[in-house]
Amino acid sequence: QPDITVLAIPPSFVDIFASKSARLTCRVSNMGNVESLEVSWWKETGGKLETAVGQRVLQSNGLYMVEAVASVCADEWDRGEDYVCKVNHHELLFPVEERLRKMEGE
């Protein structure tokens, strides 16, 4: 059974331009079940963000994937602040943290 993977996906320029907000996506894959899954987005300097956890999706390998999304205003994203996706699941030995930040020139 593959290990659980956590991937932080930055917002696309098109989304930011169209909606004036930045969608931060945290994709958690390869889970046997999602009952004990806890996912939250945090702003490094400002606490927990409202995080919408999506429905579980069955992957081709028979395991599950879930995406959790938080939105911040485009100005906040443009300032280059750090955002952290925190994931906890009973199949993980330790909680996993993935960081996102707007890179220069993006």
Image (tube, rainbow, N blue to C red):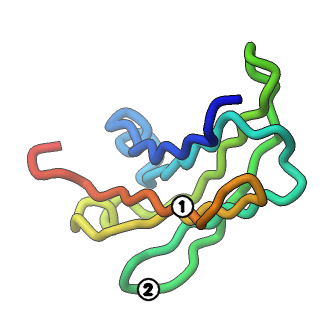
Classify residue 101 by image quadrant. Answer: bottom left
Q: Where is residue 37 shown, x and y percent of the image?
A: 78, 57
**Residue 25 versus residue 2: which sits nearer the camera?**
2
Q: Mark 1 points at which residue?
A: 96
Residue 46 has which mark? Answer: 2
Q: Residues within 10 Å of mark 2 (few under 14, many from 20)?
A: few
Classify residue 41 by image quadrant. Answer: bottom right
Residue sitting at the far right: 35
Residue sitting at the far bottom: 46
- In the displayed structure, 3 sits above or below 60; it is below
Amino acid type, mark 2: Gly
**Residue 36 versus residue 3: which sits nearer the camera?**
3
Disc nearest the viewer among 1 and 2:
1
Q: Please, what secondary structure does the residue beneath circle 2 have?
A: loop
Q: Where is residue 9 shown, x and y percent of the image?
A: 44, 42
Seen at 18% across and 51% down, the residue is 103
Q: Residues within 10 Å of mark 1 (few under 14, many from 20)?
A: some
Q: In this view, does 37 lie to the left or right of 79?
A: right
Residue sitting at the far left: 105
Q: Please, what secondary structure does the residue beneath circle 1 have?
A: strand
Seen at 53% across and 59% down, the residue is 71
Q: Assign the C terminus to one quadrant of the image.
A: top left
Q: Where is residue 17 shown, x and y percent of the image?
A: 35, 41
Of mark 1 and mark 2, the one earlier in the sequence is 2
